[in-house]
Every structure is written in structure tokens, then in C-alpha cells.
Image (cartoon, grey):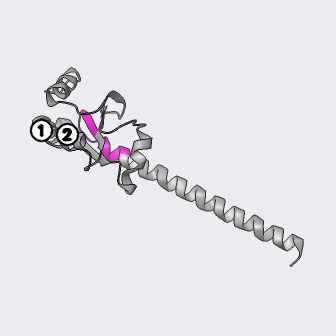
Amino acid sequence: MSKKLVLKNELLIVLIILTLLLITSCKAQEDSNDKKKSILSNAKVTFIELGSVNCIPCKQMQPVMRAVEKKYGDQINVIFYDVWQPEQKHYAMEYKIKLIPTQVFLDENGKEFFRHEGFFPEAEIDRILEKHGLN
């Protein structure tokens, strides 16, 4: 093979790789936008719990999340991401968490207004939500 042909083949391979990277990054952005649309329901607040089903404080948060969801009904959207699962690990980076569990509270526009790390008692969550207009 001539040197020119080898260079053309190498350039073609590089272009194919770059194209694939571009396509996958666009897909990731679409997935992120779809997730944000689903988070931004008609609820006044979205409560995101980033944790794992295998961590003890995270397990302790499960009944708290259910109680909050039941108490506030459609005023709140409660979401749990198990950041130790490969398909949900990217949420740990997206929300820049340092430890689990981490609770992130978003307003109706998707803007974060409060964050907490560790176990978060229901009474303290109630105070945060009441300050944000939930009853």
C-alpha cells in the first residue's frame, strides 16, 4: 500500500470515530433533556434522592421518601436514582454528589433550591417543603 492510501485510511478511521463520538454525545444530551422534562411535571417541587439500595442510610430514606410522596401528593415529584447501578451512575456526576444519600430539591422550573447530604429526617424535609409553599 502506498503511504497516501494508508494516510487516507487512517484519516477515514479517525473521522468515523469522531462521528460516533459526536452521535453518542448528542444522544446523551437528548436523554438528559428527556429526563429533565419528566422531572418537570406539574409538581411544585421535585425531590431527588441519589443513593443506593445497598447503603444503610439510603435504605433508611426509603420510608421517608414514601411518606413525603404520600403526604404532598401531586405537589411533589419524588425520584430515586441508585447511583451504584451502571445505568444510573451518571446522575452522581450530573448532580455532583460527594456522598450518598444526597437529596436534591428542584423548583417547578428545574432549578435547585436545596441540597442535603446523609440521612434527612422527614420533619426537616417538611420544613424545607413548607418554606417552598407546599402544604
The image shows residue 20, relative to residue 47, as above or below, that is below
Q: Nearer the viewer, residue 24 or 91?
A: 91
- The answer to whether residue 78 of the structure is visible from this angle is no
Q: Identify the residue at image location x=27%, y=42%.
A: 41
Q: Which mark is residue 43?
A: none
Is label 2 or label 1 in front?
2
For image coordinates 40% across by 35% down, the residue present is 98
Q: Does the magenta segment cover residue 39?
A: yes
Magenta range is 36-48
| Structural distance between the alpha carbons of marks 2 and 1 | 10 Å
**Quadrant of the frame with the C terminus:** top left
Q: Residue flagged by tag 2: what amino acid is it? A: Met
Dot 1 surroundings within 10 Å: few (below 14), some, or many (20 or more)? few
Q: Secondary structure at mark 1?
A: helix
Q: Quadrant of residue 104?
A: top left
For residue 72, what is the image quadrant? Answer: top left
Measured as percent of width and height from the top left, residue 112 is found at 36, 30
Picture layout, residue 29 above or below residue 129? below
Q: Point out residue 59 in the picture as x, y percentages from the top left corner.
A: 20, 44
Q: Is residue 65 visible?
A: yes
Q: Which amino acid is tagged 1?
A: Ala
Residue of label 2? 61
**Residue 78 image offset from top left, x and y in percent:** 23, 41
Tell me whether the residue at label 2 lies in contact with that at label 1, contact meaning CB atoms closer than 8 angstroms.
Answer: no
Label 2 vs 1, first from the N-terminus: 2
Question: Which residue in the protein does label 1 denote?
Answer: 67
- For residue 89, side relative to residue 14 (left or right): left
